[in-house]
Image (cartoon, rainbow, N blue to C red):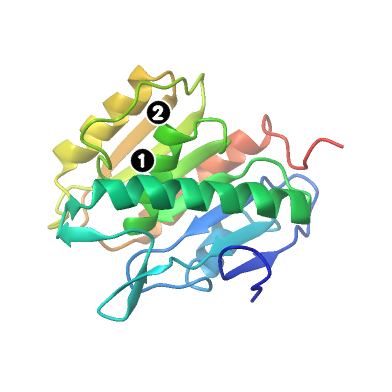
Amino acid sequence: MSNNLSFIHRFEPRSRPDGPPLLLLHGTGGDESDLLPLGKNISPGSPLLSPRGKVLEGGMPRFFRRMAEGVFDEDDLRRRANDLADFVEEARKQYGIAAPIALGYSNGANIAAAMLLLRPNLLAGAILLRAMVPLKEAPKTNLAGKPILILSGQFDPIIPSSNSSRLAAMLADDGARVRQNTLPVGHGLTQADVDLARKWIHEQAAVLPTEAPR
């Protein structure tokens, strides 16, 4: 665990040369250790940057506030998405990594989607697990071929698959290369999510830089 940047976080350096950096963004109630096993499973040897959300909801960490299930405090979301983006830029300088691929689950996937819309140059791409449209009035931005994988649950009681499809369309309209899969599952993650994410990240590893420019 490290506290010397603006977010409490964990960083695990690369152990192989061709693994793209991953930004791990946990769901409600998770922390900076929560998605490390998933990151290692999906992209073994990649550098992993994993911050802890600063908002507490009933004592459980999140990345931004919400009014109710599926109803976001969008002013807070915008501010905290920019704060998180600033942290990623600080961490890239400190650890010498290239722009990361976000790997976010639920609340973490939603703030990753918000960063794509608000700070489009920050991330190299994203794996959004159980994500929904984060902003009702999202700014038009240029995602210029950025690769994005969205994995939705057909039986998700929290996020209708139609909402995830709207997010996919929104990102594609901004130029991203979006792949969306709707799995016959609920809100929780399954082995199918891991397998699809691993295959997708392997495809991206051949074309994305793994180290920061010198």
Q: At numbered mark 1, what does the secondary structure look like: helix, strand or loop?
A: strand
Callout count = 2
Q: In which quarter of the image is the N terminus?
A: bottom right
Q: Quadrant of the C terminus?
A: top right
Looking at the image, can residue 129 be seen? no
Question: Is 206 above or below relative to 83?
Answer: above
Label whose residue precedes the other's in the sequence (2 or 1): 1
Residue beneath the point at 28% across and 25% down: 169
Q: Which amino acid type corresponds to the residue marked 2 in the rendered image?
A: Val
Residue beneath the point at 64% across and 59% down: 48
**Residue 207 or residue 62, whichever sits in front:** 62
Residue beneath the point at 52% across and 43% down: 199
**Residue 211 or residue 90, whichever sits in front:** 90
Looking at the image, can residue 180 be seen? yes
- x, y percentage for residue 144? 51, 19
Question: Is 41 above or below relative to 211?
Answer: below
Q: Distance between the residues labelled 2 and 1?
A: 7 Å
Q: Determine which residue is flagged by label 1.
A: 150
In the visual, does 35 lie left or right of 100? Answer: left
- x, y percentage for residue 5? 65, 64
Residue beneath the point at 36% across and 21% down: 140
Residues tagged 2 and 1 counted as in contact (Cβ below 8 A): yes
**Residue 58 or residue 25, whichever sits in front:** 58
Q: Determine which residue is flagged by label 2.
A: 178
In the visual, does 5 lie left or right of 110? Answer: right
Q: Which amino acid type corresponds to the residue marked 1 in the rendered image?
A: Ile
